[in-house]
Amino acid sequence: MVSNSYGTAKRCAKCNKYITETSLEVDGKSFHPWCFTCKACGKPIQGNFIPHKKNYYHPSCYTENHAPRCAECNRPIDGAYLKHDGKVYHESCYRDNIAKVCIVCNQAIVTGSSLHNEWGEHIHAEHKPWVEHCNSCNRFVFSKHGYKLGDGRFQCPECSKTEIIRERDARRVMKEAYSKLAQYGIRITTPVDAIEHQLVDSKRLNHLHKSSGSGDQYGLTHSSYQSRNGKIVSRDFKIYILSNLPYEVYLSVVAHELFHVWQNEHDCDGGDAAWREGSANVASYLVLKDLNNALAVHHIKQMDETEDINYGEGYRRALKFYQVRGMRPFLAEVERRCFRATP
């Protein structure tokens, strides 16, 4: 009850005047109905409100001024949101514009575990049992996306576009590598047309490797010679390379094997195995870097990162020597480190 003398009347928490009629009670404080206003818009609050730092807001005004804003559309977020890389998003904005899309089901990956590769491909983790990796580039391969070769390897659609499966194409690429190496100063004495070439599947190549004791998963060079009076008078070479490799990979492999031909011609296909294989990988690097496309960059990155003592560590040591000293000293170092006494 309010007395005429204001003895028992309440004071408004905002204007500090006596309240002689209806009052609003909020958080233990009293207000004239017209004094209980929104901090943001200044209009009286009737109905629901949101307290914030000792002030009061219409729900819509609070959302506009204090709710987190979506990093995609910049509109305030009222309710649930998703957080990614320190930013917040409306679920719909994240799903439609930010989330990665699973290449298996073509649905956005919004929650849950996922897998990805260096090509920017993503899959839901639950699809892993149905996904393989392309043996040439490491892209994801599944039943509707690529195929399985007869020797058990998997091939993605990108690699199948340029795969080498005919001998005439294989020989064309070998001539290209032969020419590129010559331009860099790696001149092979044996004419390119005199070097035999054969495409093989992985089973045949593995069998050849076991017979020769070498370990390159993509190719193998077999050499033979004829001698007279203890002196070599002729040399013969046959290069075996894995079939169905995409052009870029095939070019790098045949460059690697052609460098082994050069090594044999210079009696330096023995000695330090890391330098022998690593220097051959430098030949692969030279033909790949000129292409400067995604698959070439991918395979250079593989050589940069592999932990194999011969094809990785040996390659990185040989490449550094070449980059610092140049081609002529590099080839001389290969001859020194990989020297093999002639029969």
Image (cartoon, grey):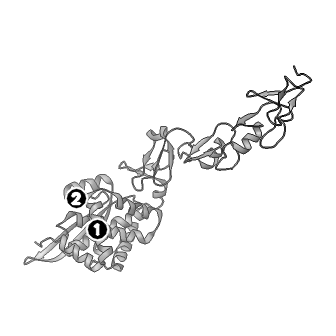
Dot in front, 1 or 2: 1
Side of 211 where 201 appears, left or right: right
At a point 23% along the width and 56% down the height, the residue shown is: 209
Percent x, y for residue 106? 57, 45
| Residue 214: mark | 2
Helix, strand or loop for disc 1: helix
Side of 10 where 200 appears, left or right: left
Percent x, y for residue 139? 45, 52
| Residue 289: mark | none
Q: Is residue 183 above or below residue 58?
A: below
Classify the position of the C terminus by image quarter.
Answer: bottom left
How many callouts does the rendering have? 2
At a point 84% along the width and 40% down the height, the residue shown is: 43
Q: Is residue 249 above or below residue 18?
A: below
Percent x, y for residue 45? 82, 35
Percent x, y for residue 129? 44, 39
Q: Is residue 98 above or below residue 196?
A: above
Most foreground residue, 341 or 146:
341
Side of 227 where 217 appears, left or right: right
At a point 53% along the width and 44% down the height, the residue shown is: 104
On the question of residue 273 being in view, the answer is yes
Most foreground residue, 316 or 214:
316
Helix, strand or loop for disc 2: loop
Q: CA distance from mark 1 to mark 2?
A: 14 Å
Q: Earlier in the sequence, mark 1 or mark 2?
A: 2
Q: Residue furthest left?
A: 229
On the question of residue 107 being in view, the answer is no
Q: Residue furthest right?
A: 4
Label 1, on which residue? 280
